[in-house]
């Protein structure tokens, strides 16, 4: 995305109502002009739904049908709400409230609580996990971290489906869901958790919705005040509403029909949180006079990507499938999607990393590439493979950008410099917004070159570098902007959790990828048992897995690669099958399940699969147990088995790595990762053949660093390759060669 797209130059908003309609396609225009009565917009992926509904609001305001303060636009993430507010400002509709359900409800609850209940609103829990852990302890149940997360999720599901603790076991049985633990135990923890909250005068985010519903139901005078304020409602991502959110919407409406809902049943992927597409699917039946508009012109993806997405949904069954949208790409043709079969997961990760390296060399930026997988536990092997290729990456769903300590500190420094203006000595010698930001952040750890290594120092630098890039984009889009303008922009983004892009390949789960898009997407691990996931038992659960894959496919603008492996570990039994969802979609595989031979396409995948030496299953060198975890495979031992690490050698290897990374101008992990160095320091190889057996030491790194590492293992001083020590670049020294 260009800087101009992120920061449109502010101009006078169009004065006439019809001017707002310019540039809309016929269906988007139909949405924008449907100002009266209930409206249902069925919007496929990439069809410009946000554009359509924001123009509808702006058109309604300019036509005199709506007042800005009377419109409440609802969505599901702070980021989406922030984007909507930004677009509305540019269309001259700055007074419209665009919020999440929770944000809108909390604001009303805070305002009306003294009148409805008296006193101050109870303290809001930012995170409920700690209290759930305490509730479990009171119930004499020990939970590890993953179990604690599961129980917390079950409590959230129960609350948004308006299920009280004593009814939870029956609700689980009626829903057909597979509970992560005994429902009676969970019900006990749930009850203890609710009691703890009451004892401590606290509420959680689900309580915000429940209490708002209670106030509006019990106090008609307050409900009338809210309805007097908000007379027009827009609900984005309507397929994701829970029963509790639907109930709150109905109370806000109070029987009126001035509501516009927007959604796509084919993108319902959050049923585990209580979301259901039934409200969207039943909307025309509940509102027989509703205007229904279908947006099917896809402006995001190429015809090749759209064709695959349509083919994937053509096999769907169930209610949602009856109303599926057949997308029509509006873009020029692009490359065909690739389908690659690998013998095992490490080989798959290596092949994907090489494919990403090729895209980078062809001009695709790292920030426009994503690797998407079904569960977060799959990320490690791809982190390792990208590190081995020297490719920077970021994990989607980590700590929120604006909550990082270094970002908060940078914000304070920028705000202080903006207040001081010309009196700030840092700004007296600098000209231009970006230069001023670089000067201020230079006092907080930012440098023109990144530090070596991949730990906290590097993470801090990446955060500050993201702020520098944001300032550069902001300055190009608004040449007259001052430092105070940037600070205001940062505050707005912090409120919306709209973080700037950190340059690196994105690694994310399919669920976390919803709402995002990239030029190139690698969908990995597409084998039975992972896609659909093993615990998807019912037909409905399997169909949600299909929709999850559909969401992944539609994240890609142009380049799309789908891959799977036949075994988890090198040399393991090739017992896996490609996902049933690929049936009939893989070129040359016929109409049945994707055939192994016909499924292979893309040179890298074939080379990786064909040339790799077949090895037996990896076993712990201490206890002999078969190894499946990527970290354990690298160490060649179980995490719990005794380590014979040569600590002095490990420290020498770390010091050597730091210096080599500095010479090459690369992060330290691009030389060797910590796990690889640890494995070397435990094995202490005596020759190249022994060093080559260590996971993470491929042919390229063996040729490049092998002599130096072996010298260190022998207690000698390493000598770098003459060409590299003489100042050769990373590319000249073979940084793009492939490991095998």
Image: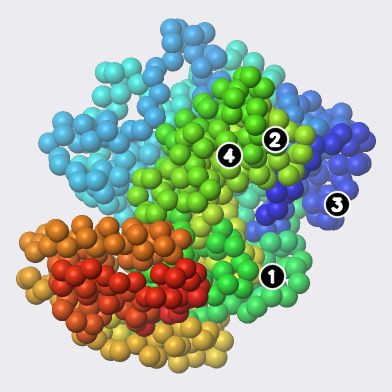
Residue 23 shows which numbered tag? Answer: 3
Residue matched to label 4: 438
Res. 337 image quadrant:
bottom right
Task: Judge depth for marks 1 and 2 and give the one in front.
Answer: 2
Q: Dot 3, how many residues are within 10 Å of its Cα: few (below 14), some (14-19), or many (20+)?
A: few
At 41% from the left edge and 62% from the top edge, which residue is drawn? Answer: 663
Q: Position of residue 394 (x, y in %)?
A: 46, 55
How far separated are the C-alphas under marks 1 and 3?
Answer: 20 Å
* Mark before the other along the chain sequence, 1 or 4: 1
Q: What percent of the width, then of the height, locates residue 218?
A: 51, 17
Q: Position of residue 383 (x, y in %)?
A: 38, 63
Task: Choose mark 4 or mark 3, whichever is in front.
Answer: 4
Q: Earlier in the sequence, mark 1 or mark 3?
A: 3
598 vs 147: above or below: below
Looking at the image, tell me whether mark 3 or mark 2 is earlier in sequence order. Answer: 3
> Measuring 23% from the left and 82% from the top, which residue is drawn there?
688
Determine the CA span between mark 4 and mark 3.
38 Å
Q: Residue 302 got which mark?
A: 1
> Sequence order check: which comes first, mark 4 or mark 3?
3
The answer to whether residue 607 shows anywhere in this view is yes
Looking at the image, what colour scheme do you see? rainbow
Mark 1 or mark 2, earlier in chain: 1
Q: Against 28, is 415 above or below?
A: above
Instruction: Name the spot of residue 387 as percent of width and height, x first.
Output: 39, 65
Question: Which mark is on residue 431?
Answer: 2
Q: CA distance from mark 1 to mark 2?
A: 42 Å
Quadrant of image for the N terminus: bottom right
Whether residue 486 appears in this view of the structure is no
**Front residue of this view, candidates 554 and 608:** 608
Circle 4 sits in a helix, a strand or a loop, which is it? helix
């Amino acid at each position: 995305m260009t800087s101009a797209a992120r920061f449109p130059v502010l101009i006078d908003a169009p004065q006439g109502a019809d001017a707002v309609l310019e540039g809309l396609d016929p269906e988007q225009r139909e949405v924008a002009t449907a100002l009266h009565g209930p409206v249902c917009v069925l919007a496929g992926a990439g069809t410009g739904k946000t554009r359509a509904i924001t123009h509808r609001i702006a058109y309604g305001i300019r036509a005199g049908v709506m007042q800005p303060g009377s419109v409440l636009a609802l969505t599901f993430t702070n980021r989406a709400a922030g984007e909507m507010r930004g677009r509305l400002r540019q269309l001259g509709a700055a007074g419209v409230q665009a919020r999440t359900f929770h944000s809108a409800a909390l604001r009303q609850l805070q305002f009306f609580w003294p009148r409805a209940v008296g006193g101050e609103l109870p303290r809001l829990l930012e995170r409920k996990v700690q209290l759930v852990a305490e509730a479990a302890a009171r119930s004499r149940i020990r939970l590890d971290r993953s179990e604690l997360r599961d129980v917390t999720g079950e409590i959230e599901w129960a609350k948004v489906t308006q299920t009280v603790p004593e009814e939870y076991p029956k609700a689980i049985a009626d829903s057909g869901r597979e509970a992560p633990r005994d429902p009676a135990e969970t019900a006990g923890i749930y009850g203890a958790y609710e009691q703890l909250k009451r004892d401590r005068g606290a509420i959680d985010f689900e309580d915000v919705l429940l209490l708002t519903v209670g106030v509006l139901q019990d106090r008609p005078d307050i409900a009338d005040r809210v309805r007097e304020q908000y007379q027009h409602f827009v609900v984005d991502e309507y397929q994701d509403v829970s029963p509790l959110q639907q109930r709150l919407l109905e109370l806000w409406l109070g029987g009126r029909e001035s509501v516009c809902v927007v959604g796509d049943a084919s993108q319902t992927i959050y049923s585990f949180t209580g979301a259901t597409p039934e409200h969207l699917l039943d909307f025309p039946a509940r509102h027989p006079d509703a205007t229904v508009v279908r947006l099917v012109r896809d402006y995001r993806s190429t015809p090749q990507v759209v064709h695959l997405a349509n083919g994937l949904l053509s096999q769907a069954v169930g209610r949602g499938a009856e109303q599926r949208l057949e997308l029509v790409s509006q873009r020029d043709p692009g490359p065909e999607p690739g389908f690659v079969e690998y013998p095992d997961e490490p080989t798959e990760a290596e092949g994907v990393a090489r494919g990403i390296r090729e895209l980078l060399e062809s001009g695709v930026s790292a920030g426009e590439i994503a690797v998407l997988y079904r569960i977060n536990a799959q990320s490690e092997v791809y982190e390792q493979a990208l590190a081995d290729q020297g490719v920077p990456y970021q994990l989607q769903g980590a700590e929120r950008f604006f909550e990082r300590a270094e970002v908060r500190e940078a914000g304070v420094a920028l705000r202080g410099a903006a207040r001081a203006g010309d009196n700030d000595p840092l700004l007296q010698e600098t000209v231009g917004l970006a230069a001023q930001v670089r000067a201020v952040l230079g006092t907080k750890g930012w440098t023109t070159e990144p530090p070596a290594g991949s730990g906290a120092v590097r993470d801090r630098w990446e955060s500050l570098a993201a702020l520098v890039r944001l300032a550069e984009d902001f300055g190009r889009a608004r040449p007259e902007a001052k430092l105070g303008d940037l600070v205001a922009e940062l505050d707005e983004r912090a409120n919306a959790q709209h973080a700037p892009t950190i340059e690196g390949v994105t690694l994310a789960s399919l669920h976390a990828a919803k709402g995002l898009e990239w030029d190139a997407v690698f969908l990995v691990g597409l084998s039975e048992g992972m896609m659909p996931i093993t615990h998807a038992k019912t037909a409905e659960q399997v169909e949600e897995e299909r929709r999850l894959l559909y969401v992944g496919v539609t994240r890609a603008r142009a380049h799309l690669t789908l891959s799977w492996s036949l075994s988890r570990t090198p040399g393991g039994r090739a017992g896996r099958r490609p996902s049933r969802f690929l049936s009939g979609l893989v070129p040359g595989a016929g109409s049945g399940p994707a055939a192994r031979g016909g499924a292979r396409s893309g040179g890298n995948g074939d080379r990786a699969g064909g040339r790799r030496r077949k090895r037996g299953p990896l076993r712990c060198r201490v206890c002999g147990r078969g190894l499946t975890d990527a970290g354990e495979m690298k160490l060649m031992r179980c995490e719990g088995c005794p380590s014979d690490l040569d600590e002095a050698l490990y420290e020498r290897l770390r010091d050597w790595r730091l210096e080599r990374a500095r010479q090459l101008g690369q992060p330290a992990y691009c030389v060797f990762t910590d796990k690889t160095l640890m494995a070397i320091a435990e094995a202490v190889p005596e020759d190249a053949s022994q060093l080559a057996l260590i996971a993470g030491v491929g042919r390229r790194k063996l040729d490049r660093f092998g002599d130096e590492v072996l010298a260190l293992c022998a207690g000698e001083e390493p000598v770098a390759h003459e060409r590299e020590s003489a100042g050769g670049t990373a590319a000249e020294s073979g940084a793009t060669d492939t490991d095998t």
